[in-house]
Image (tube, rainbow, N blue to C red):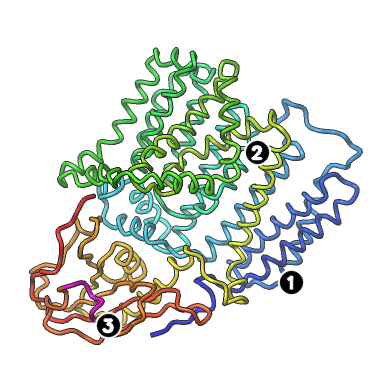
Amino acid sequence: MASQHPTPGYPGQRMGILAALIAGLVAGWAFARGRPGRLAAGGTAGLLAAGATAVVAALGGDEWPLGIGLGVAMGAMVARGQRPATSGQQPAADSQQPTASGQQLIHILLALLLLRLGLALGGGLPLAPDEAQYWDWSRSPDLAYYSKPGGIAWLIGGWTAFAGHSLVALRLLGLALATAAMALTWRVARAAGADPWLATALAALLPIHGLAAGLVTTDVPLLLCWAGFLAVLLRTPAAGGMAAWWHGPVLGVLLAAGLNAKYAMLYAPLALLPALALPQLRAWLRTPAPWIALVIGLGGLLPVLLWNAAHDWVGLRHLAGQGTGGAKPWRLIEYLGGQLAVGLPVSLLLPWATVWAWRGRRERPAAWLIASAALTPLAALLLLSLQAKVQPNWPALAWIPAAVLVALWLPHAATWARRTALAGAGLALFAAVLVAAVPALRARFPVLLPSVPERKLAGWDELAAVVDGQLTTDAITLTAGYDVAAELAWHNRHRPRPLCVNFGRRMNQYDLWERLDSRHAGRDVIFAMELERDDRLLGDLLDRLPRGLREDFATTGVPRVVRVQRGGRDWRRFLVVRLSGFDGTLDSAHAAKSW
């Protein structure tokens, strides 16, 4: 069965976005004649027009004349806000009014928000397997889950009870959390003495943040809690601020909330260790506030401990097993390359900003405190990378303080550093527009090879439709991995949750829920699995089934291959087969491993 889609899940052609970008660039440049920064005005107008067009396209049609009209309108608006070159007026240093560069940064942040809002409202980004898994967790509320604390499931459960179980609802939740994290980044930068608009723009443009905006993963609430923690910490005497009774309790609540989002929030107290070089921090540690925060914060681990105690400590054993892959020094290079990529352009400038913060730690304690917050997770995971594979998003906590530190350092840096930051920001902006316009490019250039994320997100709805069509009243959906189980649970949410069998893989949450056993004797199952990309589909397709699975059933149906195709090319393939008459004992299953 081959399934043809003109685009990988995005509605419309979205050529209006590219038309808006070009029209805004030209109109802004033309209207800003005689004013400084004509090219910057054009670029800003183009971005705003592209973002506005993305939102309009999500709510209605998407035609290129609309994009051109919005581009011209945004060009006129931005150029009108540009100060004439002869005025020479700038807001006073203590004024709350943004400078001209600050206004451009505000426009850029607004454009990014509009682009991501358009993507969210248009449903153009299907749920990734991890997101579908977290959504499925929310349907079974618990204190914690196998691999993560319970916070993400609580958030999704509370939100969907209000907004419903739809892709748009979940995307809006992720976008709201990411936007709130960037708003708190503004507060962090202001408390540290950096240009808040520059720091927020740098943070929002980082690939690790830009690509995650709108996603519903554990990193999103984690970053929100982390940014709030830093914003409060920088107001304490540890960073040269004034003491207040509420510092300890609020820091503790934020630490506890972060720990229920993701265990990586433990880096928050550890980040104070490099900052012990600050006399202000050592003095603050002699007061009750930090210890009140620590007690309240670690209390946030109570739900996790209670859940693990009731489940043979499988979650903690899973965590312990992540660092036991054996020494492989080449992973260090992989880790460093990954962090360089997800943190651009801040990752290029962070070493120089760190040296600057260390040298001036006595005069600028906030700068070194921020540097410590950035370096601690990066250094800890650098050591872990020698023993195990570290995913690029694991040090996500590092990049908000890193962006603030770089923004704090740039006014004191050489010209090359400012140019590097500008070039990196420009590339990130181009990537944001390109992501929004990918459907149009994909439709017009089908020969383009798919990216890894596109391939991994494509075809789940098509697989779910085939499985749903084969399900009868008493049939059960059966899978071998959490990714297929979670995606089928999401797309076929009108059906009972799929069962997931371990045929020799690492344990997951589905292994702790209902299993295929004697209670299902005599029942039929619809088994779904993904085929290898290099499988040429030769021979008996049933040989691809897990070893021994066929023997646990009386009869086996005719297998069907679901071919997910774009532009006449197979992106991925799934195998779906009906197995009838379960004998009540799944002899082919393996014992689950918790590491």
Which mark identifies residue 198? Answer: 2
Crowdedness near tag 1: few (<14), some (14–19) or many (≥20) residues, C-alpha within 10 Å: few
Q: Say which of 349 and 165 sits in front.
A: 349
Crowdedness near tag 2: few (<14), some (14–19) or many (≥20) residues, C-alpha within 10 Å: many
139 lies left or right of 159: left
Which mark identifies residue 541? Answer: 3
- Is label 2 in a helix, a strand or a loop? helix
Residue drawn at (52%, 66%), measured in percent from left and top? 124
User: Residue 497, how many percent across, how many down?
Assistant: 26, 66
User: Residue 266, how many percent across, how many down?
Assistant: 36, 34
Q: CA distance from mark 3 to mark 2?
A: 56 Å
Total numbered circles: 3
Q: Check disc 3 and give the amino acid type.
A: Leu
Q: Check disc 2 and give the amino acid type.
A: Leu
Residue drawn at (50%, 55%), measured in percent from left and top? 214
Residue drawn at (75%, 67%), measured in percent from left and top? 68
